[in-house]
Image (cartoon, grey):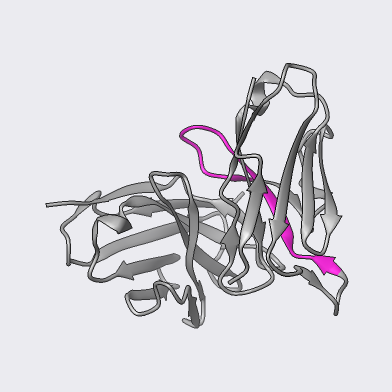
């Protein structure tokens, strides 16, 4: 059974960079797509983007100018960087595995990131 | 972007009664090349991540009770809980996974 665990700071200052890592266990990161999804305080779910084990990426156009995703196959991890954050980026951030067809079949427990001074 | 709109935003159903949640997409999520609807349903309970219930509009995931069923095609979809149980109290989301960016409905809260 695939397990995912998000890690990173729970508090980020405005204009700084939000950095999160997802550690995958129970499956090799190679051979799959992986994504980041966030859930706002109002409970809306927003897809941020995907990364493949090769390093290939695809981002939500609404966030593309501020997002970078990467993968570390040696550690079985993938990461999210979101630059120039504002209070609107406050959310629970989830990492997920992508199943055939592009839907999300395994999720981490999520990590709350608050943007505030 | 494909906009996903769910209705209603919330509904209260008695135990043992039927719950029906609708999801409408702003454009078809039926992919002609494989004749599959790229539409999934998720259930989210408080403090937990979303859980995949139904894929390809109508395929129940392993372990999901058969009181949950998905239907629809093209732009109009429905998730039905045939006989609501206490453990079904949750927020339900539809997701289109045909186009980038992937987009979710706003969620429907099911209460007793």
Q: Please name whichever residue, A1 or B39, is drawn nearer the observer in this view of the structure.
A: B39
From the viewer's perspective, tell me whether residue B69 is left or right of residue B95: right
Q: Residue furthest right?
A: B35
Residue A59, percent across and down? Answer: 47, 75
Q: Residue furthest left?
A: A117
Tell me if residue B49 comes above or below residue A19 in the rendering.
above
Q: Residue at x 77, y 43 (%)?
A: B79
Tell me if residue B80 comes above or below residue A7 in the rendering.
above
The C terminus of chain B lies in quadrant: top right
Residue A72, percent across and down? Answer: 40, 73
Q: Residue at x 65, y 48 (%)?
A: B6
Tell me if residue B82 comes above or below residue A45 in the rendering.
above
Q: What's the magenta region?
A: B36-51
Picture quadrant of residue B80: top right
From the viewer's perspective, tell me whether residue A7 is left or right of residue B26: left
From the viewer's perspective, tell me whether residue A34 is left or right of residue A115: right
User: Would you say residue A73 sits in the magenta stretch?
Assistant: no
User: Would you say residue B45 sits in the magenta stretch?
Assistant: yes
Residue B57, percent across and down? Answer: 79, 55
Q: Please name whichever residue, A46 or A81, is drawn nearer the observer in this view of the structure.
A: A46
Q: Residue at x 41, y 59 (%)?
A: A22
Picture quadrant of residue A79: bottom left
Q: Residue at x 36, y 47 (%)?
A: A111
Residue A115, percent across and down? Answer: 22, 53
């Amino acid at each position: 059974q695939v397990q995912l665990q998000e890690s990173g700071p729970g508090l980020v200052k405005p204009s700084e960079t939000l950095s999160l890592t997802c550690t995958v266990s129970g499956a090799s990161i190679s051979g799959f797509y992986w994504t980041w999804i966030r859930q706002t305080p109002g409970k809306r779910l927003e897809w941020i983007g995907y990364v493949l084990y090769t390093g290939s990426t695809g981002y939500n156009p609404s966030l593309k100018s501020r997002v970078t995703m990467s993968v570390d196959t040696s550690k079985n991890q993938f990461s999210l960087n979101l630059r120039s954050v504002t209070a609107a980026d406050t959310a629970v951030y989830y990492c997920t595995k992508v199943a055939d067809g592009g839907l999300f079949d395994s999720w981490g427990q999520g990590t709350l990131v608050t943007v505030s001074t | 972007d494909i906009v996903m709109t769910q209705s209603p935003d919330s509904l209260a159903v008695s135990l043992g009664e039927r719950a029906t949640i609708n999801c409408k997409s702003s454009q078809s999520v039926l992919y002609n090349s494989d004749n599959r609807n790229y539409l999934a349903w998720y259930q989210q309970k408080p403090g937990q991540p979303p859980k995949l219930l139904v894929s390809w509009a109508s395929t129940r995931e392993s372990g999901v009770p058969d009181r949950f069923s998905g239907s629809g095609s093209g732009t109009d979809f429905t998730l039905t809980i045939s006989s609501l149980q206490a453990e079904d109290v949750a927020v339900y989301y539809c997701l289109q996974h045909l186009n980038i960016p992937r987009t979710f409905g706003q969620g429907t809260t099911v209460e007793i």
